[in-house]
Image: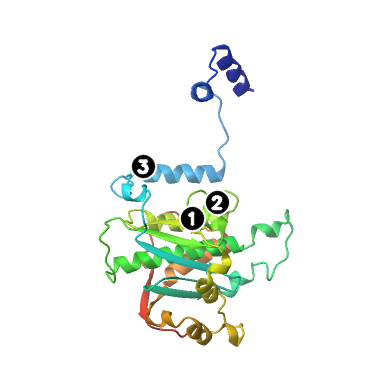
């Protein structure tokens, strides 16, 4: 109602230019909200967000308030990774650098569509571990792997603020790298983990979409799990993609995996405190 009244006022002022009219309306709404004395209800989610923002702004020595221009401008990435997830496992790689594979524990598998049946408004939908969430976990682990490679000085980069482009065949997971997962507390929990890893980290991550049929190696890695057939084994993976034998294998730490699984199973929000150990690398290991 207020917006309609202000829009009418803008027309009376002969602000026929759409841009001028929009700025006039936004300015008036902002002033009216600032002068308003009415109390508003703050949800638990909003309160958590406000506390987090206050914490970061109150500690400029601990949390950097600057963003390197190398993370903003359009430029070629320094590193490229690919990832994919199934309801049984997840995996990813960066060509010539590393690959990794993790089979989801039973507590996570039991909450996927393979094991529970839900409807749109069913209470169990809040418990569901969707493929979107699992694909987002893959992006986080790929980021952890590149971060650990640079941190351990296994590789070097001339760019002081490297950029990683992660290719995913899941558009929701791609979107969650740049906007809040507002409809799922489990997605928010995962985003908190990623935020904790990105704060004060010179490595930046962006996502791009790749069609599923082109994401062959990542897809093959994600389909290796304990109850799979011989056609989806590490031996078969080695035969089809022999190049990965020379790449380092990344093993995510138990600390990282535990945080990810708690977010997936309970929607646990651990805040933005950084993890002490992201994982380690093993040279040329193709066994499970």
Numbered circle sitting on residue 181: 2
Tell me which label, 1 or 3, sits earlier in the chain.
Answer: 3
**Numbered disc 3: secondary structure:** helix
Q: Position of residue 133 (x, y in %)?
A: 56, 61
Q: Which residue is mark 3?
A: 57
Does the image show residue 88? yes
Q: Position of residue 186 (x, y in %)?
A: 56, 57
* CB under 8 Å between discs 1 and 2: yes
Vertical relation: 156 (above or below) 123: below
Numbered circle sitting on residue 115: none
- Residue nearer the viewer, 60 or 245: 245
Tell me which label, 1 or 2, sits earlier in the chain.
Answer: 2
Vertical relation: 50 (above or below) 241: above
- Image coloring type: rainbow
Badge 3, how many Cα within 10 Å: few under 14, some, many 20+? some
* CB under 8 Å between discs 1 and 3: no
Numbered circle sitting on residue 191: 1
Q: Quadrant of residue 204?
A: bottom left
Badge 1, how many Cα within 10 Å: few under 14, some, many 20+? many
Q: Quadrant of residue 100?
A: bottom left
Query: Is 238 situated left or right of 229 in this image?
Result: left
Does the image show residue 251? no
Q: Residue furthest left?
A: 158
Spatial separation of the CA atoms under disc 3 and disc 2: 22 Å
Q: Residue at x 56, y 63 (%)?
A: 211
Label 1 or label 3, whichever lies nearer to me, is: 1
């Amino acid at each position: 109602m207020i917006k309609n009244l202000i829009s009418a006022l803008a027309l009376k002022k002969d602000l026929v230019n759409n841009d001028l009219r929009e700025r006039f309306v936004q300015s008036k709404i902002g002033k009216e909200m600032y002068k308003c004395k009415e109390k508003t209800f703050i949800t638990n989610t909003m309160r958590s967000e406000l506390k987090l923002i206050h914490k970061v702004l109150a500690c400029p020595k601990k949390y950097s308030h600057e963003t390197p221009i190398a993370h903003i401008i359009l430029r070629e990435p320094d590193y490229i990774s690919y990832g994919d997830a199934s309801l049984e496992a997840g995996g990813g790689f960066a060509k010539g650098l590393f690959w990794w594979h993790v089979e989801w524990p039973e507590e996570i598998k039991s909450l996927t569509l393979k094991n529970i049946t839900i409807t749109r408004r069913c209470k169990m939908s809040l418990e569901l571990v969707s493929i979107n969430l699992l694909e987002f976990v893959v992006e986080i682990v790929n980021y952890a792997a590149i971060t650990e490679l640079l941190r351990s000085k296994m590789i070097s980069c001339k760019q002081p603020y490297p950029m990683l482009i992660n290719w995913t065949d899941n558009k929701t997971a791609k979107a969650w790298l740049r906007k809040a997962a507002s409809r799922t507390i489990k997605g928010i929990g995962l985003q908190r983990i990623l935020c904790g890893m990105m704060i004060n980290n010179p490595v930046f991550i962006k996502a791009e979409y790749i069609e599923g049929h082109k994401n062959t190696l990542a897809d093959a890695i994600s389909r290796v799990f304990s109850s799979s057939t011989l056609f989806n084994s590490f031996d078969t993976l080695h035969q089809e993609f022999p190049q990965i034998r020379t790449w380092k294998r990344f093993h995510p730490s138990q600390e990282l995996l535990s945080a990810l699984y708690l977010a997936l199973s309970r929607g646990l929000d651990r805040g933005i405190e950084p993890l002490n150990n992201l994982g380690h690398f093993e040279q040329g290991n193709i066994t499970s």
